Image: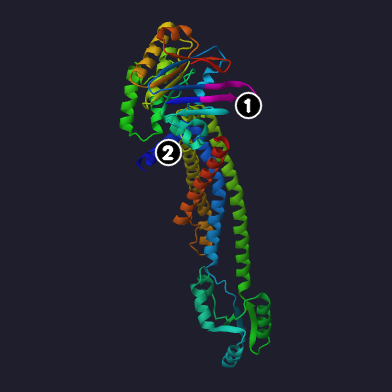
Amino acid sequence: MRTWLRQHRGALARAVRKLAAQRAATLLNALVIGVALSLPAGGYALLANLQGVAQRFTFEPQVSVFLKPEAKRAELEARLRADRRVAALRFVSRDQALAELRVAEGLADVVATLERNPLPDTFVVRPADGGGAALEALAGALRALPGVAHVQVDSAWAERLAALARIGRLALAALAALLATGLVAVTFNTIRLQILTQREEIEVSRLLGATDAFVRRPFFYLGLIQGLAGGVLALAILWGGLWVLNLGVRDLARAYGSSFQLAFLPGGDALAVAAFAALLGWVGAFLSVSRYLR
Amino acid sequence: MISFSAVAKRYPGGQEALSGVTFSLAAGELAFVTGPSGAGKSTLLKLIPAIERPTAGSVVVNGQNVGALKRGAIPYLRRNLGLVFQDHKLLYDRSVFDNVMLPLAFGALAPRDAARRVRAALDKVGLLARERANPIQLSGGEQQRLAIARAVVNRPAVLVADEPTANLDAESAARIVDILLSFNQVGVTLVVATHDEALVARHGRRVLRLAAGRLAAA
């Protein structure tokens, strides 16, 4: 076990020495990987931020039933509760709605200028069936009730946003897969060149009794380190990019009375990006070694 | 220790380098493999560490049938052999010390013990004072001595040297032979391929004479 560990330590040291001896090439390779990885990582961060914003609002379909001033609330409530298509019901009085509006970001100033409360009493209905057709049928039935001024299906925009986010995630996954393939190819080629330049050393080592594992190990570490360095660089690029973007976002958010800012990836996700990059480096090295060190 | 039985070696393309070679070497024995260029000396030597595999017959080294060894077992066979190549096969991107250290890097020796072994081997061949030099700075004879130090650092039971005195002046060649003989005197089995008949005659040991791939005298 001690020998095995010592050999791994030796292989790691040899890989680090090789990388240090070719500083410029190492940096350029890491930069290529870093820039390529920063694109999907950046997209992921932006999507996570967008999702964060969207999650402040409900994605559960609901129907708002705005009442006329003369509407008979108790009678209407009884009819709604009796309807099997209604899973839950909540009454929001016009005063309560105004109070909620007052504390909403960016609207306090607007509400303060109002001379009287323009908002109607509202029933917020959670339908038993959230499907598009059932929702529309329910909305139509609610519109026909006496005392109802307006019916609004509130989930539509949220559903559209969620659908857009899903498309974004799919596009990101495709981009990440494409760039991951590119990164594997970059590492594959780097390791191939390393194998070619060390062909003599490899041949002599084998003649003197080096096992395949001993010969291959430093190349695996080389790929792993190169991938990891690229991953760390990608995170640095992402952090810098978000910092620059936030200069503009801060002003925009302030104009809406919000303190919203684009957040960096959570710790676990950042670690996953670095680990994924290291894994890609290892895969590239593995493929190269399998091809050229047979 | 080393036993060849009806060994043949045919290279791809049809050239038969060895045919019906049979001989045995006991532990501690010294044998010169001689013959003209193309007689099969290098091929015979390459069969011992399984650099080449026989196409017929068997080669047994330290009790192992080399021809039947799996690829994964070959490194362990080679670690018990000392190999000296005609072209030295030194690494010129590292020091004399690191060249000799190379075979120990594969093994289980602790770094401090390995360094002691390396210095002992370098001392034995008279290169201890040059341990920090690059092999490129050494003369041909010194490079060959360095190759010997690397071959013996693992304390092998068998030492195989292919034309160790080729391209060397008489004085350097004599020193190389003296060093090789000194290992044989302490019990190392020694197989030396050479086309230098004078050298063979001078030492009067066992001679395996090859001609066109066949053993003319053993």
Q: Which residue is mark 1?
A: B12
Q: Secondary structure at mark 1?
A: loop
**In the foreground, A149 or A91:** A91
- Residue at mark 2 shares a chain with residue at mark 1: no
Q: How many marks?
A: 2
Identify residue type, mark 2: Leu
x, y percentage for residue A187?
A: 55, 40
Task: Report whether A178 appears left or right of A103.
Answer: right
Mark 1, Cα crowd under 10 Å, few <14 / some 14-19 / many 20+, is few
Q: Quadrant of the C terminus of chain A?
A: top right
**Residue at (55, 56) in percent of width and height:** A46
**In the foreground, A5 or A133:** A5
**In the foreground, A177 or B89:** B89
Identify residue type, mark 1: Pro
Q: Which residue is mark 2?
A: A12
Q: Quadrant of residue B55?
A: top right
Q: Secondary structure at mark 2?
A: helix
Q: Is residue A56 visible?
A: yes
Q: How is the image coloured?
A: rainbow
Q: Quadrant of the N terminus of chain A?
A: top left
> What is the chain letter for disc 2?
A
Tell me if residue B38 comes above or below residue B101 in the rendering. Answer: above
**In the foreground, A213 or B61:** B61
Mark 2, Cα crowd under 10 Å, few <14 / some 14-19 / many 20+, is many
Tell me if residue A161 comes above or below residue B24 in the rendering. Answer: below
x, y percentage for residue B64?
A: 45, 32
- In contact (CB < 8 Å): disc 2 and disc 1: no
Q: Quadrant of residue B116?
A: top left
The residue range painted magenta reads B5-21
Between the C-alphas of marks 2 and 1, the distance is: 39 Å
> What is the chain letter for disc 1?
B
Magenta residue check for B17: yes
